Image (spheres, rainbow, N blue to C red):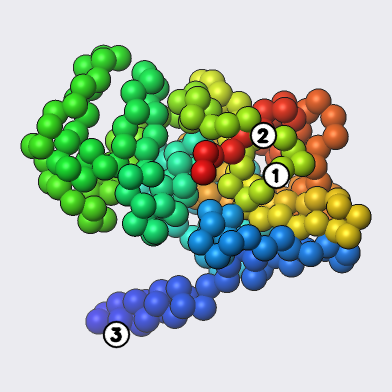
Amino acid sequence: MRFGICFSIFFLLISSIFSESIQERFQPPNGYSRISYPKESFSTYLQNFPLKPKGSPVFLFNGTKKQNQVHEAVLDFPLLGTDLIQCADAVMKLRAEYLYSRKEWEKITFTISNGMSVPFSRFAKGDRVVVKGNKTSWKVGFAKKGTNRDVFESYLQFIYNYAGTISLKSELKKKQLQDLEPGDVWIQAGSPGHVVMVVDKAQSKEGNTLFLLAQSYMPSQEMHILKNDTTNSPWFALPQGEFFATPEWEFMTKAFYGFNK
């Protein structure tokens, strides 16, 4: 039994060392070249995000397989054991994890559903938000302080509970399709709403653009790279009409946004 446990740990360590990133697994189609971004940018962070082994199914938070397997790859970041990390939460998690990896604590901030801005820097000072119905207030300096992982995870779980597509959209900036880059999203705010995120980009010499999309969904499930019904799948072309169809949601093409730098 002990040998089996040790072997399992060894296998997980080896898998993590040799895991492929998004850009390593998905080469652009013939005639296209991947766009490079500054090394420390959010776009580069996403392009280099690790993937689970090829052929991995998408699992739900409760350990069961997602019924509708619409993916080409699964991003390698863990879920919680509860139905919290859905579409908007996964996007916010990726953004927060990027800033956390750079120790840019002051830039980690999200708006919750009642319009209150909740920065991680307040959690790092030991402050916490008290929720009573739709009213929220800060309770100052009574909880654990610091920027350690456990405080960060506590912050994220609060955001998962009280933010969603409506609050996320309120803090994004409108973008034009020609300015698309990894980190941008299509988002429909609502209950339910949905959001998908661009995680890679390639262009041809003629200036045509292809991109990869990732999503989580309902119920809470692993974030995954979406496939489509074109010969270039999983690469998507810029939508031309009024609507942009993805495997599980149709967006207004103009519902395209990005994070503030």
Question: Which residue lies under the disc numbered 1?
Answer: 180
Residue 175's mark?
2
Check disc 3 and give the amino acid type: Phe
The residue depicted at 64 percent of the width and 70 percent of the height is 24
In this rendering, position of residue 115 left or right of residue 196: left
Around disc 2, counting alpha carbons within 10 Å, would you say few (fewer than 14), some (14 to 19), or many (20 or more)?
A: some
Around disc 1, counting alpha carbons within 10 Å, would you say few (fewer than 14), some (14 to 19), or many (20 or more)?
A: many
Measured in 3D between alpha carbons, the distance from the residue under mark 2 to the one under mark 1, in whole angstroms, is 8 Å
* Residue most extreme to the bottom: 3
In this rendering, position of residue 232 left or right of residue 41: right
Picture coordinates of residue 117, whole percent (x, y): 34, 28
N-terminal-most mark, 3 or 1: 3
Q: Residue 246, located in which quarter of the rendered image?
A: top right
Measured in 3D between alpha carbons, the distance from the residue under mark 2 to the one under mark 3, in whole angstroms, is 54 Å
The residue depicted at 58 percent of the width and 35 percent of the height is 195
Q: Secondary structure at mark 2?
A: loop
Mark 2 vs 3: CB contact within 8 A: no
Q: Is 147 placed above or below 217 here?
A: below
Check disc 1 and give the amino acid type: Leu
Picture coordinates of residue 78, whole percent (x, y): 41, 55
Q: Report if residue 49 is visible in the image.
A: no
Question: Which residue lies under the disc numbered 3?
Answer: 3
* Residue most extreme to the left: 142
Q: Secondary structure at mark 3?
A: helix
Mark 3 vs 1: CB contact within 8 A: no
